[in-house]
């Protein structure tokens, strides 16, 4: 098993997990390379399959969960249930093993996947994450791809994370991108293709949704190497939009207060 040193990692093994969309994924990364990625079954609840999926992937690589040095998890935005199950799974494993954990924005992981794709954005172009938020809205974040630095970071956030109507988000990006070519990916990108091409220009590249566990593991490894991994209990979901339950609770509280005031 690798040794974890504050600010430095030797022979590091990272487990990346994404449960923000119906098709989740698990990945194992070792010494800067993704060894394997496995998708989950969208017809089954994450809670029923994650332990087995993680164990199966580790066994296929002749590894055990005790070999994992750092755990990375996509923290959102996405399915509320998926986020909670994914974060709880990583928290449980990391806590039991005494390992650090890193929360990674699913939108940043998506942009990272675009930036390293074979025909992905070059330095000076943009990588945009565009995922289904339901209610006719999308989760969106736009990043500028920069030349790799000493620590390997190549993404600089230009806009977001945000949630809104596709036309609103595309209009925002048109101003922020400043004429740069934009590569857009995510499960809502193909259905918004016409709008994105109209707003961002005919050179806009549009792709679907890649598996995110690999880029989650990559970003988690980088942050752990900078000493930014933390205790598992510190992991927090990235909602962007408030959960429906909270909105309903506040609305009911306001209605009760209004009702008392009118009597």
Image (tube, helix red, strand yellow):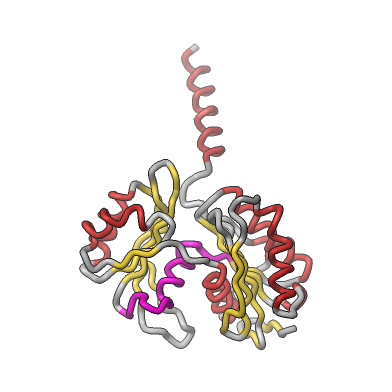
Residue 85 percent coordinates (x, y): 65, 54
Q: Nearer the viewer, residue 10 or 136?
A: 136
Query: Is 235 displayed left or right of 185 in the figure?
Result: right
Tally the marks: 0
Residue 146 percent coordinates (x, y): 36, 79
Q: Nearer the viewer, residue 163 or 129?
A: 129
Q: Quadrant of residue 115?
A: bottom left
Query: Is 137 displayed left or right of 33 in the figure?
Result: left
* Residue at 53 percent of width and 43 percent of height: 243
Q: Is 238 above or below relative to 252?
A: below
* Residue at 54 percent of width and 28 percent of height: 253
Where the N terminus falls, by quadrant? bottom right
Query: Is 56 displayed left or right of 107 in the figure?
Result: right
Boundaries of the magenta span: 103-123
Residue 178 percent coordinates (x, y): 22, 67
Q: Nearer the viewer, residue 94 or 42?
A: 42
Q: Quadrant of residue 90?
A: bottom right
Q: Nearer the viewer, residue 184 or 154?
A: 184
Q: Is 220 above or below relative to 74?
A: below
| Residue lying farthest to the top in this orientation | 263
Q: Is 192 above or below relative to 32?
A: above
* Residue at 68 percent of width and 67 percent of height: 231
Residue 8 percent coordinates (x, y): 62, 85
Q: Is 195 above or below relative to 33?
A: above
Whether residue 116 is in magenta: the answer is: yes
Whether residue 110 is in magenta: the answer is: yes
* Residue at 59 percent of width and 54 percent of height: 42
């Amino acid at each position: 098993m690798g040794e974890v040193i504050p600010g430095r990692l030797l022979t590091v093994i990272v487990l990346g997990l994404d449960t923000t969309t119906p098709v989740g994924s698990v990945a194992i990364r070792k010494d800067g390379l993704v060894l394997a990625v496995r998708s989950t079954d969208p017809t089954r609840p994450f809670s029923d399959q994650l332990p087995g999926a993680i164990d199966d992937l580790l066994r296929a690589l002749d590894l055990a969960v005790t070999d994992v040095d750092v755990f990375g998890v996509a923290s959102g935005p996405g399915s509320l249930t998926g986020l909670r199950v994914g974060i709880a799974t990583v928290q449980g494993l990391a806590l039991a093993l005494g390992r650090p954990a890193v929360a990674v924005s699913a939108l940043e992981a998506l942009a990272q996947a675009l930036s390293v794709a074979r025909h992905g954005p070059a330095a000076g172009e943009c990588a945009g994450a565009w995922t289904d938020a339901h209610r006719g809205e999308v989760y969106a974040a736009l990043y500028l791809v920069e030349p790799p630095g000493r620590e390997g970071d190549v993404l600089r956030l230009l806009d977001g994370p945000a949630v809104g109507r596709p036309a609103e988000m595309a209009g925002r990006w048109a101003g922020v991108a400043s004429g740069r070519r934009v590569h857009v990916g995510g499960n809502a990108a193909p259905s918004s293709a016409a709008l994105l091409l109209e707003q961002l220009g005919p050179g806009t590249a549009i792709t679907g949704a890649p598996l995110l566990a690999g880029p989650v593991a990559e970003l988690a490894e980088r942050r752990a190497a900078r000493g930014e991994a933390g205790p598992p209990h510190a992991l927090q979901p990235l909602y962007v939009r408030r959960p429906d339950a909270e909105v309903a609770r506040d609305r009911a509280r306001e209605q009760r207060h209004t009702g008392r005031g009118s009597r």
